[in-house]
C-alpha cells in the first residue's frame, strides 16, 4: 500500500525533542491533519540538551537556488500534506514557497540501506527580506500509517521576523522513507513572493568507530580518522589505568582545515569528570596528560560546540590517542607546604646562604600534568642582600613546555591562614610605585588587611600563596610575587625551552622558586627539566642596604619605555665630590634589569663648560654597559657605551666620551639653571647605568664598570658650538640635526 493510498488514516508521532531556536517551543506539534501529536520514546532518535542545528550567516548560508527545481505549491493541495508530499532526489536542490498562513510544504525521500546520514539544507537567499522563519521537521515512516518525528530544525532568527538558514546533518539509522515538513515557525507568517531552497541528501557515515555515542558503546582508540558527522554526534573512546599514580594521556589532532573546535571531556567509570577542554583547529595536535583517580576504566567524549555544523569531510577528520602512562615526576612538591629543598631538608633547608656564595645541587623533574607547579625552597639566614641566579630548562629544544619561573618573597608581618588571605598584601598603595616588591596596586580590594573592616581599599597585589607557619596551626605569612618570568609589560605571556634570570634578595628568610609551564597547559613526559640555583653576595656597594631608600635604584623587574623614572631619580647617589675630584665611580649590573643611578651638581653653574668622561666596559662580560647622562627632567642629555661585542673582549675596555666632533658633544649648559627640590638648589645632572637590553647581568669579579670625569673645561666646546642661535649644544651643521643616541 502506498502512502498516497493511506494518507487519510496516517498519524504523525513526535518525540520530546528540543527545537533549535532562540525561543522555547513545546514538544507537541500540530500537523496539517489538525490532530494533536503524541510523545513516544524512540531509542534511535537524537536526544539531549546539547544538540543544536548548525547555521551559517544569513548571506553566506542560504542555499543557492540557481540550479534548483521549482515546485509551485501556491497551487492548493500540492505538496501541502504527507499524502501529497513531493518526492525529491538525494542531492537535488528544490525551490518552493510558504504561500498561505498556517500551511506547510511536504517532501519525501528514500534512504537506502547502508546510508545513515541525512544532510538537510534550507533557507532563503541572503538578499531576501521575508517574514517567514523556517521550521524544518524530519519524520521517519515507521509503518504504513505512522510518521515518527526524527528532528525539529529551526533556522535561528535574528528577530521575530528575521531569517537565517538550516544547514546540518542528521543520523538516520533506519533505511526507508523519510518525510520533511517545511513551515513558518510561528505558523502565521507566509511569503508568496520569495522562494526558499531546500536540499536533502543521504550519505554513508565514514566514521569506522560508529556506533560509539555512549560509554557502553565506547571504542578503543586507534589510528583511524574519526568524524563528528551528524547533529549531536558524540564520539566516546575508552582506555584503562592499571596502576595507582599512572597518568592518562590524551592527544587530539584537529586539523587546521577543520571549521570548529572539538570539545573533550574525560570521565571515570563512575562518571566523575577528570578533565575537560577544547582542541581548536591547528597544525599541531593538542597533547596533554591528566592525573587519574587510580586503576580502572576511563572515557573521553568528543563533541562539537553548540551551533557547529557537522563535518564528515577529510578536512574535518580528527585522530585521537587516549591511553595511560607511568608518571615520571617522582617528587611531590606541588604546593608551597610540600616545597623541596635543593641539597636536603624540608624547611629549614640544609644548605642556606649565610654570607658566602652557595651553589645548590641541580634538580631534575618533569612538568607532567597541566597546571602543575613545582616549589623549591631557598633559605637565607644572614648576609642579605644577595643575588639569586635561576636557570631552568629542558635539554630538548623541541619540548612543548614553555618554561617559566616565579620568585616568591615573604612579606614579614602579613599573617595568613590560607592562600585566599594573600590575594592582596598588607601594604596600602595609591599607585604601582608604592608596591616596589609586587609591582602592582589593586583598587577596590576587600581584604582583612584593609584598615576599615568591610570597606574596600587599595592594596599591593599579592601572590595568592600563604607561606605556612613554623608549626602546625601557626599562622603563616603572605608571599610577595617578586618576579614572574612569564609576565611582560605588553601583557603577552612569555615562556621558552629555558629561562635564566638573576634577581636580588634583600632580607633573610625563606624564598620560593616555582617552576611551571607559562600557560599552565603544556606537559612533557619524555624530557625532564633541570633547575640550577646559585646565591652570591651582592657585589655592588650601592645595592647592599636592606633599606630600600638607601639603594641607588627602584627595583623593577619589568622595565618598559613607559616606566616612571622618578622613583629612581629620588634614589640617585650624589657623586658631586667624585666628579670635582676626578675620582672614578664604580658599580655592577649584578642582576637582570638592574640599573644604577647617580647625580652631580652642574660643574660650572650659569656657564657653558665641556666635560670629558672616561669609562670602563667590563670584559669579557655578558653585560653590555650603557651610560646615560640625563637632564633634571630625565630627558637624555648624552649617552655613550662600548660599540663592540662585550663577550668577545679579553679584558676591560677603556674609552672616553668628550668633544672630538659634533657627534660627541659632552657639556654642561649655561641654560641649565634652577634645580628641582629646595629653592635655590643647584641644577643636577643624572647618570643612569644599565645593560643596553636590560636582560644581561654580571656579578662576577670582572663585572665592575666605572666612569670618571677627567676634565672640566670652561666655555662651550668647539664640537658643541655648531648649535643655532648661539646655544651650546649637540648639533652638526652637515646634517642639520643633533645625532640621536646610538644606545
Image (tube, grey):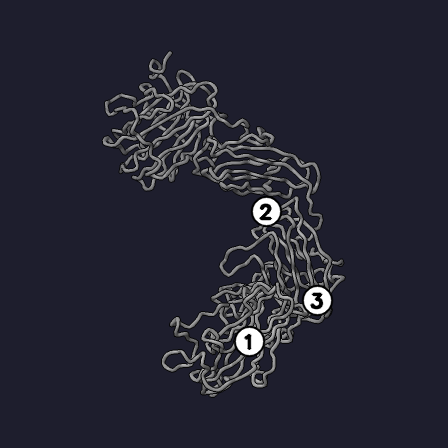
| Relative image position of residue 717 (x, y in whole percent) | 46, 82
Tag shown at residue 656: 1
Is residue 466 visible in the rendered image? The answer is: yes
| Relative image position of residue 284 (x, y in whole percent) | 54, 42
Q: Secondary structure at mark 1?
A: strand
Between marks 3 and 2 in the image, the one whose residue lies nearer the viewer: 2
Q: Mark 1 or mark 2, which has the lower sequence index?
A: 2
Q: Which quarter of the picture shows residue 151?
A: top left
| Relative image position of residue 336 (x, y in whole percent) | 66, 57
Gap between marks 1 and 3, in whole Å? 41 Å
Q: Which of the pair 501/669 is nearer the observer?
A: 669
Direction from residue 308 to residue 268 in the image, left or right: right
Which residue has dot 2 on it? Answer: 400
Direction from residue 725 to residue 403 in the image, left or right: right
Gap between marks 1 and 2, in whole Å? 48 Å
271 versus 679 height, above or below: above
Which residue has dot 3 on it? Answer: 380
573 versus 269 height, above or below: below
| Relative image position of residue 171 (x, y in whole percent) | 46, 27
Q: Mark 1 or mark 3, which has the lower sequence index?
A: 3
Q: Mark 3 or mark 2, which has the lower sequence index?
A: 3
- Mark 3 Cα shell of 10 Å, populated few (<14), some (14-19), many (≥20): many
Amino acid at each position: 500500500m502506498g502512502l498516497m493510498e493511506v494518507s487519510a488514516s496516517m498519524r504523525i508521532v513526535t518525540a520530546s525533542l528540543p527545537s533549535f531556536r532562540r525561543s522555547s517551543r513545546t514538544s507537541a506539534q500540530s500537523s496539517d491533519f489538525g490532530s494533536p501529536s503524541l510523545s513516544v520514546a524512540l531509542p534511535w532518535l537524537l536526544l539531549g540538551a546539547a544538540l543544536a542545528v548548525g547555521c551559517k550567516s544569513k548571506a553566506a548560508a542560504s542555499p543557492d537556488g540557481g540550479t534548483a527545481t521549482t515546485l509551485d505549491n501556491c497551487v492548493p493541495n500540492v505538496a501541502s500534506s504527507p499524502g501529497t508530499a513531493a518526492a525529491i532526489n538525494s542531492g537535488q536542490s528544490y525551490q518552493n514557497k510558504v504561500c498561505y498562513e498556517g500551511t506547510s510544504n511536504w517532501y519525501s525521500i528514500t534512504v537506502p540501506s547502508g546510508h545513515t546520514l541525512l544532510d538537510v539544507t534550507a533557507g532563503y537567499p541572503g538578499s531576501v527580506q521575508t517574514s517567514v522563519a523556517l521550521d524544518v521537521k524530519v519524520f521517519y515512516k515507521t509503518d504504513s500509517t505512522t510518521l515518527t518525528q526524527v528532528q525539529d530544525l529551526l533556522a535561528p532568527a535574528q528577530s521575530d521576523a528575521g531569517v537565517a538558514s538550516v544547514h546540518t546533518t542528521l543520523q538516520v539509522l533506519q533505511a526507508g522513507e523519510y518525510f520533511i515538513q517545511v513551515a513558518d515557525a510561528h505558523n502565521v507568517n507566509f511569503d508568496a513572493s520569495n522562494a526558499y531552497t531546500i536540499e536533502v541528501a543521504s550519505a554513508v557515515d565514514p566514521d569506522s568507530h560508529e556506533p560509539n555515542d555512549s560509554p557502553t558503546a565506547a571504542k578503543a582508540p586507534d589510528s583511524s580518522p574519526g568524524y563528528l558527522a551528524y547533529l549531536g554526534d558524540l564520539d566516546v573512546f575508552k582506555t584503562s589505568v592499571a596502576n595507582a599514580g599512572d597518568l592518562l594521556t590524551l592527544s587530539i589532532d584537529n586539523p587546521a582545515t577543520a571549521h570548529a573546535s572539538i570539545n573533550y571531556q574525560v570521565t571515570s567509570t563512575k562518571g566523575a569528570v577528570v578533565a575537560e577542554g577544547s582542541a581548536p583547529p591547528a597544525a599541531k595536535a593538542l597533547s596533554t596528560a591528566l592525573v587519574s583517580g587510580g586503576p580502572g576504566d576511563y572515557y573521553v567524549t568528543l563533541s562539537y560546540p553548540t551551533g557547529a555544523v557537522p563535518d564528515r569531510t577529510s578536512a574535518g577528520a580528527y585522530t585521537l590517542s587516549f591511553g595511560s602512562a607511568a608518571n615520571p615526576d617522582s617528587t611531590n612538591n606541588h604546593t608551597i607546604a610540600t616545597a623541596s629543598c635543593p641539597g636536603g631538608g624540608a624547611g629549614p633547608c640544609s644548605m642556606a646562604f649565610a654570607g658566602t656564595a652557595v651553589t645548590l645541587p641541580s634538580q631534575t623533574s618533569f612538568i607532567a600534568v597541566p597546571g602543575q607547579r613545582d616549589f623549591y625552597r631557598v633559605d637565607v639566614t644572614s648576609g642579605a642582600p644577595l643575588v639569586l641566579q635561576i636557570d631552568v630548562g629542558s635539554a630538548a629544544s623541541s619540548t612543548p613546555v614553555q618554561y617559566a619561573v616565579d620568585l616568591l618573597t615573604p612579606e614579614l608581618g602579613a599573617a595568613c591562614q590560607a592562600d585566599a588571605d594573600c590575594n592582596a598584601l598588607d601594604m596600602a598603595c595609591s599607585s604601582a610605585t608604592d608596591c616596589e616588591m609586587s609591582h602592582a596596586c589593586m583598587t577596590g580590594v576587600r581584604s582583612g588587611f584593609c584598615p576599615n573592616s568591610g570597606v574596600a581599599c587599595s592594596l599591593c597585589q599579592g601572590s595568592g600563596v600563604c607561606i605556612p607557619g613554623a608549626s602546625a596551626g601557626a599562622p603563616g605569612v603572605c608571599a610577595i610575587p617578586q618576579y614572574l618570568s612569564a609576565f611582560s609589560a605588553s601583557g603577552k605571556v612569555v615562556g621558552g625551552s629555558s629561562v635564566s634570570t638573576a634577581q636580588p634578595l634583600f632580607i633573610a628568610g625563606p624564598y620560593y622558586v616555582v617552576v611551571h609551564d607559562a600557560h599552565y597547559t603544556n606537559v612533557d613526559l619524555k624530557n625532564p627539566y633541570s633547575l640550577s640555583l646559585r646565591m652570591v653576595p651582592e657585589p655592588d656597594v650601592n645595592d647592599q642596604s636592606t633599606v630600600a631608600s638607601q639603594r641607588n635604584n627602584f627595583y623593577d623587574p619589568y622595565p618598559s619605555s613607559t616606566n616612571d623614572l622618578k622613583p629612581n631619580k629620588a634614589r640617585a647617589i650624589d657623586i658631586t665630590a667624585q666628579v670635582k675630584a676626578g675620582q672614578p665611580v664604580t658599580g655592577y649590573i649584578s642582576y637582570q634589569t638592574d640599573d644604577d643611578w647617580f647625580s652631580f651638581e652642574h660643574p660650572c653653574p650659569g656657564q657653558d663648560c665641556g666635560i670629558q668622561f672616561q669609562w670602563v666596559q667590563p670584559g669579557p662580560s655578558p653585560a653590555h654597559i650603557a651610560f646615560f647622562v640625563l637632564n633634571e627632567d630625565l630627558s637624555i642629555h648624552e649617552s655613550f657605551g662600548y660599540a663592540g661585542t662585550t663577550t668577545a673582549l679579553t679584558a676591560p675596555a677603556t674609552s672616553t666620551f668628550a668633544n672630538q666632533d659634533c657627534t660627541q658633544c659632552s657639556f654642561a649648559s649655561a641654560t641649565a639653571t634652577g634645580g628641582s627640590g629646595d629653592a635655590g638648589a643647584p641644577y643636577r645632572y643624572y647618570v643612569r647605568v644599565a645593560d643596553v637590553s636590560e636582560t644581561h647581568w654580571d656579578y662576577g669579579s670582572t663585572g665592575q664598570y666605572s666612569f670618571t670625569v677627567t676634565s672640566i673645561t670652561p666655555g662651550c666646546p668647539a664640537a658643541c658650538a655648531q648649535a643655532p642661535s648661539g646655544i651650546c649644544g649637540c648639533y652638526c651643521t652637515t646634517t642639520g640635526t643633533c645625532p640621536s643616541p646610538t644606545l
